[in-house]
Image (cartoon, rainbow, N blue to C red):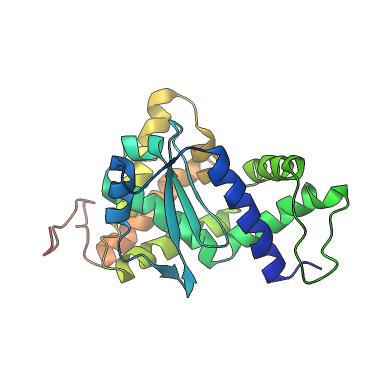
Amino acid sequence: TLSNNDIIGYVKQYIQESDSKNKVLGPETAYGKRLATLTQGLTDVDGMPLNFKVYENSEVNAFACADGSVRVYSGLMDIMTDNEVLGVIGHEIGHVAHEDTKKAFKQALLNSALKDGLASTSSTVAALTDSQLGALGDALAKSKYSKKQENQADEYGYQFLKSHGRNPIAMVQAFRKLQQMEQASGQQSSFVNNLFSDHPEISKRIANMQKLCIKDGYMDKSGNPIPTAEE
């Protein structure tokens, strides 16, 4: 019974709550300036406006919501180059474009807030309580995308960066960095665990991105970057 407008209305409540609970590093900060610079020109996905913010949090994480909100943790930016951050952003935007995030949010809403009797009985979206928002956040944290959804998000992110004049080799660089981080620590962060729910898939997905880069002339057959005119 939930329409797309209902879902977006609840998403906006969720992201507003998330922004209020986390310390947002504004555009005047080094992190904010860096994110604004590297995402310049990335204005929309299939007509949906994108908005970017940085959370001050040492966790390696990033996420995108169905309303076009993209949130990047400072911990991710600390360990990644601009291109690598863009690779992660491209992947997350892929989930938005394919409505994976909308479907996951709707399922989380059904599993949490709606089970307590919340229902959309009119054109007005009901206001979620703090406890409902908390339950929704817990449900979202436990949700995972399928292998098919992840592969599709990878390829969309690749094409998204390419179409916006960014070097899509960033997808390869970002995934390599996350793989190295996992191998060095011996354990997965929650973000890496969600991104690569099946360990063998990491190498396969990196290889898939490499094939695209080689095909499009961004990498040679050995997997080494080919400098572009801009570089």
For residue 230, which quarter of the picture?
bottom left
For residue 190, which quarter of the picture?
top right
Q: Percent from the top left, x then y, of residue 19?
A: 53, 45
Q: Is residue 15 left or right of residue 7?
A: left
In percent of the image, x 34 and y 49: which residue is there?
A: 27
* Of the pair 104 and 175, the residue shown nearer to us: 104
Q: Percent from the top left, x then y, of residue 200?
A: 49, 42
Q: Percent from the top left, x then y, of residue 177?
A: 34, 39
* Of the pair 126 and 175, the residue shown nearer to us: 126
In percent of the image, x 28 and y 61: which residue is there?
A: 213
Q: Is residue 100 left or right of residue 166?
A: right
Q: Is residue 6 above or below residue 101?
A: below
Question: How many labels sit on residues?
Answer: 0
Residue reaching furthest bottom? Answer: 47
Question: Residue 197: in sight, yes or no?
Answer: no
For residue 39, which quarter of the picture?
bottom left
In percent of the image, x 74 and y 50: which residue is there?
A: 128
Q: Percent from the top left, x then y, of residue 188?
A: 50, 31
Residue reaching furthest front? Answer: 28
Q: Is residue 166 left or right of residue 14?
A: left
Q: Is residue 109 above or below residue 228?
A: above
Placement of the N terminus among the 4 image quadrants:
bottom right
In percent of the image, x 45 and y 63: which residue is there?
A: 50
Q: Is residue 186 left or right of residue 198?
A: left
Placement of the C terminus among the 4 image quadrants:
bottom left
Question: Residue 209: in sight, yes or no?
Answer: yes
